[in-house]
Amino acid sequence: MSKRPSMLQAMARDAKAAKASPTKAKPEAPAPAATTTSDEWKTTAVHLRKDQWVLLRSVARKRADETEGRASVSDIIRDMIEKHRAELEAEL
């Protein structure tokens, strides 16, 4: 198993890649809602099979590439929860 690159190595790699590719204006992230507080966010661990984890990470990377944003598995899970909210609430 190989070691992850150090932060300096990753920064150097990213800088090199940025010079090699044409510069694009990155879209600004939306400002957080004024009513959002840290009390409204919670963190939990989720145990997944490797194939499920790979799928989530792959989708997160694809979305990040399309939006030039940051890959976020949490965003995918939140989207899935909202899409299926009625079904989940029916189980309560």
Image (spheres, rainbow, N blue to C red):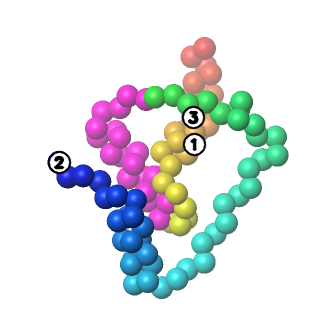
The mark closer to the camera, 2 or 3, is 2
The vertical placement of 67 against 43, above or below, is below
Whether residues under marks 3 and 1 lie with C-beta atoms below 8 angstroms apart, the answer is yes
The circle drawn on residue 81 is: 3
Q: Which residue is mark 2?
A: 1
Q: Are marks 2 and 3 in contact (CB under 8 Å)?
A: no
Q: Main secondary structure of the magenta part?
A: helix
Judged from the image, the secondary structure of the residue bearing numbered disc 3 is: helix
* Residue 6 drawn in magenta: no
Question: Residue drawn at (38%, 52%), measured in percent from left and top?
Answer: 58
The image position of residue 80, as x and y in percent, is 54, 39
The residue furthest left is 1
What's the residue at 39%, 77% (across, down)? 17
Q: Residue furthest top?
A: 92
* Mark in the foreground, 1 or 2: 2
Q: Position of residue 5 (x, y in %)?
A: 31, 58
Task: Give the distance between the C-alpha atoms of the residues marked 1 and 2, in whole angstroms.
Answer: 34 Å
Label 2 secondary element? loop
Q: Is residue 4 above or below residue 50?
A: below
| Badge number at residue 79 | 1
Lower sequence index among marks 2 and 3: 2
User: Considering only vertical position in the picture, is 85 above or below 23?
Assistant: above
* Residue 46 marker: none
- Helix, strand or loop at label 1? It is helix
Between 2 and 54, the one lying in front of the other is 2
Q: Report the amino acid beneath label 3.
A: Ile
Image x and y of residue 6, in percent:
34, 58
The stretch in magenta equals 46-65
| Alpha-carbon span between mark 2 and mark 3 | 35 Å
Q: Are marks 1 and 2 in contact (CB under 8 Å)?
A: no
Sequence-first disc among 1 and 2: 2
